[in-house]
Image (cartoon, rainbow, N blue to C red):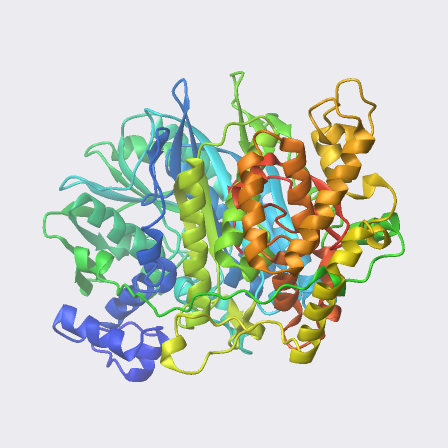
Amino acid sequence: MQDSVTSKITPEIVAQHGLKPDEYQRLLKILGREPRLTELGIFSVMWSEHCSYKSSRVWLKTLPTTGAKVIQGPGENAGVVDLGDGDAAVFKMESHNHPSYIEPYQGAATGVGGIMRDVFTMGARPVALLNALRFGDPSHPKTRRLVSGVVAGIGGYGNCVGVPTVGGEVNFDAGYNGNILVNAMCVGLAKTDKIFYSAARGVGLPVVYVGSKTGRDGIHGATMASAEFDDKSEEKRPTVQVGDPFTEKLLIEACLELMASDAIIAIQDMGAAGLTSSTSEMADKGGVGIALNLDHVPQREENMTAYEMMLSESQERMLMILKPGREPEAEAVFKKWGLDFAVIGVTTDTGRMVVTHKGEIEADLPVPVLANSAPVYERPWFQHVPPQPVLPQWVKAPNGNLDALKQMMGTHALASRRWVWEQYDHMVMGDTVGRPGGDAGVVRIHGTRKALAVTCDVTPRYVAADPEMGTKQAVAETWRNLTSVGADPIAITDNMNFGNPERPEIMGQFVGSVKGMAEACRVLDYPVVSGNVSLYNETNGAGHQAQARRRPPGAARARAGLARPIALPTDRLREARRRAAAGGSRRRDQGRASRAGPHPRRQGVGRARCLGRRAPGGSRGDGARLGRGGEPHRRRAVRLRGQAAAARDLVRRGPGPLRARRRSEAGRGGRRAGAAAGAAGAHRRAHGGRCDRAQGRGAAEAHGAGRDPRELAAGVYERRALGSVDWLGNALCLKLLWLEASHQISTLDGCALLVLS
């Protein structure tokens, strides 16, 4: 695209830049004139969803972001929390979904590089990497290429830089066939008195460019990441950046060396939108203007235009504001490390960003307007209504529990991920204490007796089934993961991946997720200090969970919910309810022997193995370990089995008695923990976990509505249920290995830093 002051802006050019007609009219009103082409490009990237958060900003403000140990919350490159003794942890998680789908290796690699720059920009040395990956069905023709490319990209970049990858997760589901999710997280360590920020305060200060040269890669990368894909997504490959991990390593060392002095006033990574976003954000935070001369920008290619240089997203570049007179000192440091150094501008008192190239003014824009004038949308949304659960009696019992367990562990949902993390260097730097494969990675704080535990996790099916409750579960799971390795949870970063926010049902998912996160973080005193929102993760209007949605007729139902429940034939549902009501008492009198079996271990074996408590004077039998008192284990197990049968009967009598029973059990839970745990397990076994209904909702989302419920239920062996009377009750950290009535695994294995996908 040619850069020219006199270029005529047509509706076609506006559309190519991702601006809607009303947004362009808003731009014209702000400027009071027609923009130059370079100015149009600048506004297009700054107003993109990726940079402006125009659809999510209003809801993200509702998250709790402060706490006793929070040094820096959202608003900077990364969050900072106090670890005591002058140490601080700097961390953030971001997505690189769209680039990774187009070009798996480079997309994933530059995602790792970008998140590391966000961390060491704050003055921290990166000490740990994590990732959360979502791929399509293993049988899909693109999955193998995408998996191999993404994993190689993450390993190739992180291993070369020399930062250990200590945790992560990998999931496969057909819902990600059209849009994979590649999320990278970085944790760094810094001193509390050496935290650097991005506000360029002061007039007449030199604006310095350091790092790699600028090329034509990644132009309009932010705009590309703010729109859904179509069948021609492969044509967007030129918008994917190309990274160089060896240059990244040099850049880390050079920046940290200069940070050891007092020469830097402000520093900012040139990430999304490149030179445009870094200059405008630094100037806006500092309340100053900025004048740039692009003639001095180090260029990798010939005849680059102002448009290309301002929008390029070439990797391994930083922008600094130095103290006057310290330029020679800084230049010597970067030249020593073999990096480019150039003074490309100066801060001014005009409050405007003026860009010149070859003696021509290519852009002259007010900084506050550029940084803060992006439209903020309160998009319409529908409250998510969960589908009806799959009832336990529809699930065919396996021939044998052990065989079923082996089959489950061999599926792609639960199979070992060792083949992935063994491709990452997780021992480099020599401070890794907890390797990948566990609940949380643990790294020593070098030279101390302290360690830092980090993790990332979410169960996407829970969020798909019930965004609010599923997100609460994800937050609680990160908490459990940290505590399971002996850590004290301090703070959390979010990473939220959803589809097109212009669709009310998708926006409803996002809103529900934010609400759930806000409530859970407040209850746990778990502030959100950084994060990322990635939207438009879909292809041709079809994204994850999208196929089972239908708009309800009439405006009056707009807030009532969109999620289409499982299509149950009316007569079948009536028959199921009639049989349950008629046979409940008879089955209860029989002690549920036909379903539960004669052995007391069939009820709550997981709890016994998790808690591992031994009754005084009792044996090491499972029944004995369920309780805290000295009651003989056989009598106690029989009594608990009777309570379980009664609880299942309550389920069939309707939600009212069930809720009453839950309230009753919650009241006496502190006095009789064993019995309460047994009743809770019965609720889970009978109903699949009412608090999230993950069994039924997961089946609906994965396989679509309208199929035979029993066929849908056949897939619950791959699901993980919340398994708690109350969502916070998951903090008990019970590892329920086998839930008899519903025949599903509930691995309540905690996690520590959050990715919502």
Give above or below for 107 relative to 501.
above
The quadrant in which the N terminus is found is: bottom left
Residue in the picture at 49% in, 43% down: 247
The location of residue 308, given as percent across then percent down, is 35, 64
Q: Picture quarter containing residue 653?
A: bottom right
Residue in the picture at 41% in, 57% down: 313
The location of residue 734, given as percent across then percent down, is 66, 37
Closest to the observer, 111 or 554: 554
Q: Tell me: 712 left or right of 489.
A: right
Residue in the picture at 40% in, 82% down: 554
Give above or below for 653 relative to 330.
below
The quadrant in which the C terminus is found is: bottom right
The location of residue 465, given as percent across then percent down, is 56, 61
Give above or below for 108 relative to 747.
below
Residue in the picture at 81% in, 22% down: 618
Q: Is residue 138 visible?
A: no
Q: Looking at the image, how many numbered discs can be counted on the residues?
A: 0
The location of residue 81, given as percent across then percent down, is 39, 31
Closest to the observer, 84 or 395: 395
Q: Tell me: 444 left or right of 512.
A: right
Q: Is residue 83 visible?
A: yes
Q: Tell me: 333 left or right of 596.
A: left
Q: Picture quarter containing residue 463?
A: bottom right
Q: Tell me: 606 left or right of 26.
A: right
Closest to the observer, 497 or 710: 710
